[in-house]
Image (cartoon, rainbow, N blue to C red):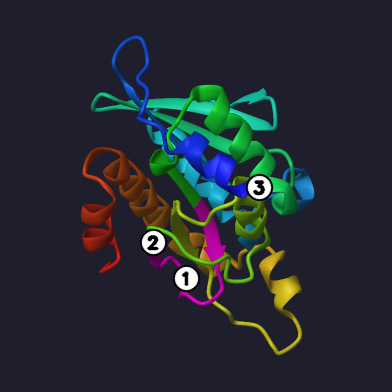
Amino acid sequence: MAGFFKRLFCRAQPQTSDSEVKYLIAGLGNVGDQYAGTRHNIGFDVLDALAGASNAVFTPSRYGSIARVRFKGRQLILLKPSTYMNLSGNAVRYWLKQEKIDLGNLLVIVDDLALPLGTIRIRAKGSDGGHNGLKSINQVLGTNDYARLRFGIGRDFPKGFQVDYVLGEWTDEEARALPPRLEAAGEAVKSFATAGLERTMNVYNKK
């Protein structure tokens, strides 16, 4: 079954009727007011900032909320899954198939404890690193061969309080530092769709 999904998503890249190549940008998080403004929802925050800068609006749909951003002949389909973090793979699989998007045009945005606040690291593939959202996507798609953007949330917490920290809200100081980093992450997303993965890694992994 794992091989089936890998073959399915690795077909030639389809195009829309107006010749726009599609990209699925999945920002991971948890739905609900109790999770808004928490560190674990940084994937949602990056997409909200990107959509807002492009005057795009999210609308509820199957397995999540969707916004569409057009940029330099590309169509970026922004997905905020409504499945909760641990079942993110269901939403990603559905929208890849629904929009006939190649696996190489998928970018997943997640939080990362191992990186300082606001640091961006883009990788072509890799393990889930203990992240339940990535674990779900890897299991459902049957592969970890897709791009991901890790957004650092820092690790300023006492031993044993990791869950509280990840699901906790940003401090006032952190919240003030976020906007330019969210903007940079949005620019990295657009670079991924226009300049390609390698070029984007070379530029943004140094910042």
Q: Amino acid at mark 3?
A: Val
Q: In the rendered image of this protein, does residue 121 appear above or below residue 9?
A: below
Residue at image location 39% in from the left, 43% down from the top? 104
Amino acid at pointer 2: Arg
Please name the residue that numbered disc 1 is placed on: 117
Helix, strand or loop at mark 2: strand
| 112 inside magenta stretch | yes
Q: Earlier in the sequence, mark 2 or mark 1?
A: 1
The residue lying toward the viewer, choosing from 1 and 143, is 1
- The residue nearer to you, when weighing 194 against 30, is 194
Q: Residue at x 77, y 43 (%)?
A: 32
- Residue range in magenta is 109-122
**Magenta residue check for 14:** no
The disc, 3 or 1, on the residue closer to the chain's N-terminal end is 1
Mark 3 or mark 2: which is in front?
Answer: 3
Q: Amino acid at mark 1?
A: Leu
User: How far apart are labels 3 and 2 at the CA level?
Assistant: 19 Å
